[in-house]
Image (cartoon, helix red, strand yellow):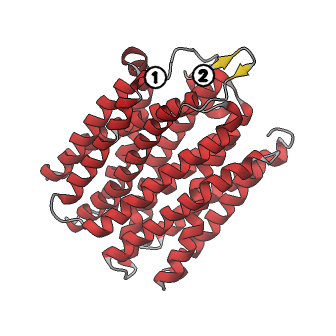
Amino acid sequence: MTQPECGPSGPAEHIHWPALIAAFSAVAAVGIALGLGLPLLALIMEKRGIPPTLIGVNSAMAGIAAMAAAPFTTRLAHALGTSTTMIVTILFAAVSSLGFYYVENFWLWFPLRLVFHGAITMVFILSEFWINAAAPPRRRGLVLGIYATVLSLGFAMGPLLFSALGSEGALPFVTGAAIILVAAVPILFARHENAAIDQKPERHFLRYVFLVPTATAAAFIFGAVEVGGLSLLPIYATRAGFTEPQAALLLTMMGLGNVVFQIPLGMLSDHLKDRRRLLTGMAFIGFAGALALPVLAQGWLTMAAVLLFWGGCVAGLYTVGLSHLGSRLHGADLAAANAAFIFCYAVGTVAGPQAMGAAMDVAGNDGFAWAIACFFGSYLLLSLGRMVFRPKRT
């Protein structure tokens, strides 16, 4: 597990910028690849007549791949080194992303999803390890805010690229693969600043899933709404009467909200005694926004404006949840809990697309909004219950 460097007087305050730039570039590539790829693949499947339930199942392979890859990531990084492992997985991600264009058989997209999202997950996890090692403890909140902003910016740029490139031909696939490959360049330059992954946590992995449930549940809800939304919001929007470019721009507005709010939310969480209050407030906004979606769908500008703020709160669950986790745990326990945090995010990416796709099949187009409201409503009950029965725990 990664640990900050230490000197005679405690953790060093020096920021290792080459390592951070390398990790941030990898995170940006992950965000762009997912932001471009998820709606692109969903709309291609929709055009081919694949029902929403199967689209949701195929999209959910991202989470299955993440859960399968996570246990092996630290082993590979320990054996090969963080930077080498990241470069290898970047190559796998780039090649498999091109495979979606050349492989037309829908059922072969399932193993392709496993390879692509498994590789992306490893890049994502190792980037977080590297960021934790390069950031000094007293400035970790700022660094995490920048990290979340870079990731959100990638997610915002992905749909924007999609709106410009469309879903026809090889260009969107080649563009996505090229962006992923470019991320390997700064990693090569920073390869001598590898983050060490060599400590063993005190508890079994699954114990960390339930150790700080308000944080890990926030990661689950974020994963469900983020991936389900990226995969099925374009379909929801086009069925509501918007054009394909308008639907893609709605995703961009949601992504821009993520970019704008992450650093302020991260800094705000540093000044709160109980971060669960902020998590609960953002969950309430997510719940109310989901219930309002059927009404907002009557006008593009209104829907885009609300998605700007709603998207920031949705992504803020991850940033503030991670900050809440860091306030409760330290050292190897924090690193192991972060892995559990990502694991819960992956479980959410499985549950979200399936639940939203099935809801659209059963309840029509508005089932998309009802499913999202159910996710946020369940988190509201959990967070409020934790604050009532555990008022002194932060």
Residue type at mark 1: give it: Asn
Give coordinates of residue 213: x percent, y percent.
67, 39
Q: Residue at x 25, y 47 (%)?
A: 178
Decide which of tag 1 and tag 2 comes sooner along the chain: 2
Give coordinates of residue 245: x percent, y percent.
33, 74
Callout 2: 10 Å neighbours few (<14), some, many (20+)? many
Query: Which of the 4 quarters of the picture holds residue 235?
Result: bottom left
Position of the C terminus by quadrant = top right
Residue type at mark 2: give it: Gln
Residue 122 appears in the picture as rendered:
yes
Callout 1: 10 Å neighbours few (<14), some, many (20+)? some
As drawn, the label of residue 194 is 1
**Which residue is the site of mark 2?**
3
Would you place residue 74 above or below residue 91 in this image?
above
Query: Which of the 4 quarters of the picture holds residue 316?
Result: bottom right
Disc nearest the viewer among 1 and 2 = 1
- In the image shown, does 327 or 283 lie closer to the viewer? 327
Give coordinates of residue 337: x percent, y percent.
61, 30
- In the image shown, does 36 or 385 lie closer to the viewer? 36
Q: Horizontally, is 291 left or right of 389 in the view?
A: left
Position of the N terminus by quadrant = top right
Q: Residue at x 64, y 59 (%)?
A: 377
